[in-house]
Image (cartoon, helix red, strand yellow):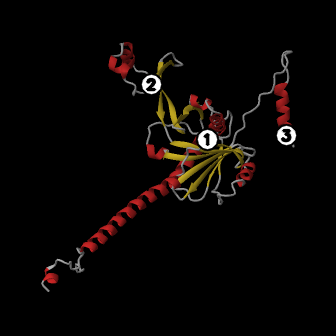
């Protein structure tokens, strides 16, 4: 009770008018906490991705593996227990496929996505690095504003990956960018470091010269921005990828948290199980055709009497029949 009184007295002192001016409205604090956990059966690459995201999100809380894959409504109770209002759940199936559930607990909505083309930070070996606990800049593609379900996904990604100011274990630095791009109806997620370096005198002299036609036509070179430093010196700002990188394919959007009616469904999504089943059926179809051709060839040889170990039937014009 003393802690509640102390917090209320602080807010009353801050909201008190000064110099005869009216007190402004109290600013609402952005309180976002993310619960990150996985199901049984994840591989080591999935576990490394979970650890990478946990390191990038200082306002997250990691929990043990969930034993069930059907009673996902229990995640709302876990989120309430750990005082989290966002849930990031990794569901592994058959040790191959990984599905990500992003939910706004306890009322929803929930987005289920299929994760593909996973590359963790340890696999990429990029030279970029960022401060642990720093806040990211979220960069969204303009395509997110073209459809209602994309707007909802963007808002949910902002709540999960956007570190609020003054969050737990966060530091007051912004030194990396998380990019969300839509291509082929998939969400491509990348993470870059904002690197600021001083420009040497040789680079200043070379920059003063006019660029050649080859340099102007080269679109693959990294883009750099020059700005004035604190001491008057020029600095060069560039982006260096850190990792991880992965692709999300939205499948369904549920109205409530891990349940409720379906408000969006991706009709173009084909499950990896169906793809593997079609491949097995195509291979089985080729084998069946090859075995049928072998049977037909054996039957044809048998009719002609050309099979080994089989006597050819005597015809009416055979010498043994005519001159018998």
The residue under the point 33% across, 67% down is 296
Tag 2 residue? 223
Tag 3 residue? 4
Q: Nearer the viewer, residue 69 or 285?
A: 285
Quarter of the picture holding the N terminus: top right
Determine whether label 1 and label 3 are within 8 Å by CB.
no
Which badge, 1 or 2, comes first in the chain's sequence?
A: 1
Q: Quadrant of residue 137?
A: top right
Instruction: Please say whether residue 51 is visible from this viewpoint.
Output: no
The residue under the point 55% across, 36% down is 131
Q: Nearer the viewer, residue 155 or 226?
A: 155
Percent coordinates x, y for residue 48 in the rendering: 52, 50
Quote the CA–CA distance across marks 1 and 3.
Answer: 28 Å
The residue under the point 29% across, 68% down is 297
Quote the CA–CA distance across marks 1 and 2.
Answer: 27 Å
Instruction: Please say whether residue 2 is visible from this viewpoint.
Output: yes
Of tags 1 and 3, which is closer to the observer?
Answer: 1
Percent coordinates x, y for residue 68 in the rendering: 66, 59
Which badge, 1 or 3, comes first in the chain's sequence?
A: 3
């Amino acid at each position: 009770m003393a802690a509640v009184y102390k917090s209320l007295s602080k807010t009353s002192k801050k909201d008190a008018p000064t110099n005869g001016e009216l007190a402004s409205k109290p600013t609402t604090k952005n309180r976002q906490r993310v619960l990150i956990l996985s199901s049984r059966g994840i591989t080591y690459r999935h576990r490394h991705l979970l650890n990478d995201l946990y390191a990038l999100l200082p306002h997250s809380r990691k929990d043990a593996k969930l034993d069930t894959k059907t009673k996902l409504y229990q995640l709302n109770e876990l989120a309430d227990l750990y005082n989290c209002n966002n849930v990031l759940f990794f569901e592994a199936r058959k040790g191959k496929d990984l599905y990500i559930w992003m939910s706004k607990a306890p009322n929803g909505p929930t987005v289920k996505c299929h994760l593909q083309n996973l590359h963790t930070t340890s696999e990429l070996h990029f030279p970029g690095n960022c401060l642990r606990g720093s806040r990211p800049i979220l960069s969204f593609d303009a395509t997110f504003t073209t459809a209602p379900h994309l707007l909802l996904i963007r808002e949910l990604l902002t709540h999960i990956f956007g570190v609020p100011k003054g969050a737990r274990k966060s530091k007051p630095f912004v030194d990396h960018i998380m990019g969300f791009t839509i291509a082929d109806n998939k969400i491509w997620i990348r993470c870059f470091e904002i690197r600021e370096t001083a420009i040497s005198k040789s680079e200043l002299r070379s920059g003063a010269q006019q660029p050649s036609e080859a340099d102007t036509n080269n679109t693959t070179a990294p883009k750099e921005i020059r700005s004035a430093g604190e001491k008057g010196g020029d600095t060069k700002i560039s982006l260096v990828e850190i990792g991880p990188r992965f692709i999300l394919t939205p499948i369904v959007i549920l109205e409530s948290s891990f349940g409720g009616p379906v408000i969006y469904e991706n009709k173009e999504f084909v499950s990896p199980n169906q793809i593997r089943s079609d491949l097995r059926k195509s291979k089985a179809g080729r084998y069946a055709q090859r075995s049928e051709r072998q049977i037909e060839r054996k039957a044809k040889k048998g009719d002609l009497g050309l099979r080994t170990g089989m006597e050819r039937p005597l015809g009416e014009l055979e010498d043994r029949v005519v001159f018998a």
